[in-house]
């Protein structure tokens, strides 16, 4: 167990948790993981006071501990929380930083037979573990989660599907409206995968009907290029931006359209040769889209004590459109929430936690 000095900055504790749920996960990722928790200055080791608890769900390619390290030109999350408490903008809370990284670059904090049962990992293992180890207010009314991008998606989905565990959620630039935020990057993904096609393309005549009509290609199955791409990326320490976006889309496919009988355990939603939409596959993606789940989970969302959503109106992944659609559908369903926009894009927007963390504290105290 590692500790930083106590004081106005609070205390960061790092524990190791061995997961039964993640043992033998399909990607072979470690089941023993570091788990960090920030304890506020008011957390006295000999005291009896208990505190609300917030779970930080980091974005794609992130890990919980990445939010606790040194950050240039700004605060990491423990420093930010300590400052907000010191300034009187929020009261003391415990903040937990779970590690949900995978070989596919992350996950969406849901259960998937192609990645692992990360929703169960959080709700059935990490929450009880934290409540045993620390003086939390161990009821859903005092427990919340927040995140950005994939973490924002995780927060929204957990508020929908797992409201018995959470009292409030906050989503910064969370994935929503898949027809906008994912569709537009699939041409890049197909181009990256084409580099690993066998046989390699040669200049000259191309029989599009024959190539695109092959059974595997037409069914969204890997003809070998997806696996070769993954092995190529796993063999590198530095990947390109295009490769990063490609593995992200493959991670989403493993999340939204897993198939234990398929190569790699999932299918892709576009024809690998022509880029044509495979309607059946895309329907499975849309079943996970928050904008399509509001009506189904209306009762759960109404149970939450607070819902906070925000997004920059220059988001390069066009998530501000998804956020607007989500807010519109929440309002139409009579679900109270706060939605804000700001003049920025998708990157480096941790400063928005200056709004969301006090919001969550007020909802959960």
Image: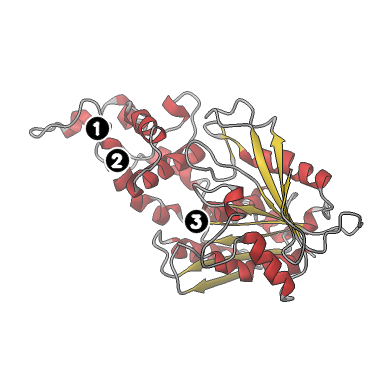
Q: CA distance from mark 3 to mark 2?
A: 24 Å
Front residue (pair 272, 300): 272
Give the residue at mark 2: 192
Which type of secondary structure does the marked residue at label 2 adopt?
Answer: helix
Give the percent coordinates (x, y) of residue 132.
Answer: 83, 44
Give the percent coordinates (x, y) of residue 324.
Answer: 50, 66
Q: Earlier in the sequence, mark 3 or mark 1?
A: 3
The quadrant of the rendering that contains the N terminus is top right
Give the percent coordinates (x, y) of residue 304.
Answer: 72, 60
Front residue (pair 229, 10): 10
Position of residue 256 relative to residue 314, above or below, is: above
Q: Kindly identify the residue that appears in the image at 46 percent across and 56 percent down.
A: 177
Q: CA distance from mark 2 to mark 1?
A: 17 Å
Which type of secondary structure does the marked residue at label 1 adopt?
Answer: helix
Which numbered disc, 2 or 1, marks the residue closer to the eye? 2
Q: CA distance from mark 3 to mark 1?
A: 30 Å
Which numbered disc, 3 or 2, marks the residue closer to the eye? 2
Residue 165 located left or right of residue 250: right
The quadrant of the rendering that contains the C terminus is bottom right
Q: Kindly identify the residue that appears in the image at 21 percent across and 25 percent down.
A: 199
Residue 77 quadrant: bottom right
Give the residue at mark 1: 212
Give the residue at mark 3: 176
Which type of secondary structure does the marked residue at label 3 adopt?
Answer: loop
Q: Earlier in the sequence, mark 3 or mark 2?
A: 3
Q: Which mark is residue 249?
A: none
Q: Can the viewer see residue 95 in this picture?
A: yes
Specify few, some or many for label 1: CA neighbours under 10 Å numbering under 14, 14-19, or 20 or more: some
Specify few, some or many for label 2: CA neighbours under 10 Å numbering under 14, 14-19, or 20 or more: some
Q: Kindly identify the residue that appears in the image at 45 percent across and 62 percent down.
A: 346
Give the percent coordinates (x, y) of residue 200.
Answer: 19, 29
């Amino acid at each position: 167990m590692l500790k930083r000095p106590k004081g106005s900055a609070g205390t960061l504790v790092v524990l190791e948790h061995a997961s039964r749920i993640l043992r033998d996960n399909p990607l072979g990722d470690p089941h023993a993981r570091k788990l960090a928790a920030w304890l506020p200055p008011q957390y006295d080791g000999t005291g009896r006071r208990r505190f609300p608890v917030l779970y930080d769900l980091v974005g794609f390619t992130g890990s919980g501990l990445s939010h606790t390290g040194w950050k240039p030109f700004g605060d990491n999350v423990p420093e930010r929380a300590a400052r907000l408490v010191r300034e009187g903008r929020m009261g003391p809370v415990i903040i937990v930083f779970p590690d949900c990284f995978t070989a596919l670059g992350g996950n969406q904090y849901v259960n998937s037979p192609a990645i692992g049962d990360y929703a169960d990992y959080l709700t059935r293992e990490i929450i009880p573990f934290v409540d045993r180890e620390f003086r939390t207010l161990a009821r859903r009314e005092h427990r919340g989660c927040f995140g950005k991008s994939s973490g924002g998606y995780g927060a929204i989905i957990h508020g929908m599907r797992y409201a018995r565990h959470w009292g409030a959620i906050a989503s910064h630039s969370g994935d929503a409206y898949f027809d906008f935020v994912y569709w537009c990057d699939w041409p890049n993904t197909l181009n990256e995968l084409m580099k690993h096609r066998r046989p390699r393309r040669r200049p000259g005549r191309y029989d599009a009907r024959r190539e695109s009509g092959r059974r595997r290609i037409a069914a969204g199955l890997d003809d070998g290029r997806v696996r070769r791409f993954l092995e190529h990326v796993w063999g590198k320490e530095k990947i390109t931006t295009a490769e990063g976006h490609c593995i992200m889309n493959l991670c989403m496919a493993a999340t939204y359209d897993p198939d234990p009988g398929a190569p790699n355990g999932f299918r892709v939603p576009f024809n690998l040769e022509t880029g044509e939409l495979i309607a059946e596959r895309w329907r499975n993606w849309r079943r996970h889209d928050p904008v399509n789940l509001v009506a189904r989970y209306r009762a759960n969302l109404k149970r939450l004590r607070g819902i906070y959503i925000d997004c920059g109106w220059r988001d390069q992944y066009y998530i501000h459109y998804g956020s607007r659609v989500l807010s519109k559908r929440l309002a139409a369903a009579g679900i109270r929430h706060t939605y804000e926009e700001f003049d920025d894009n998708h990157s480096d927007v941790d400063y928005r936690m200056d709004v969301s963390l006090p919001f969550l504290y007020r909802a959960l105290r």
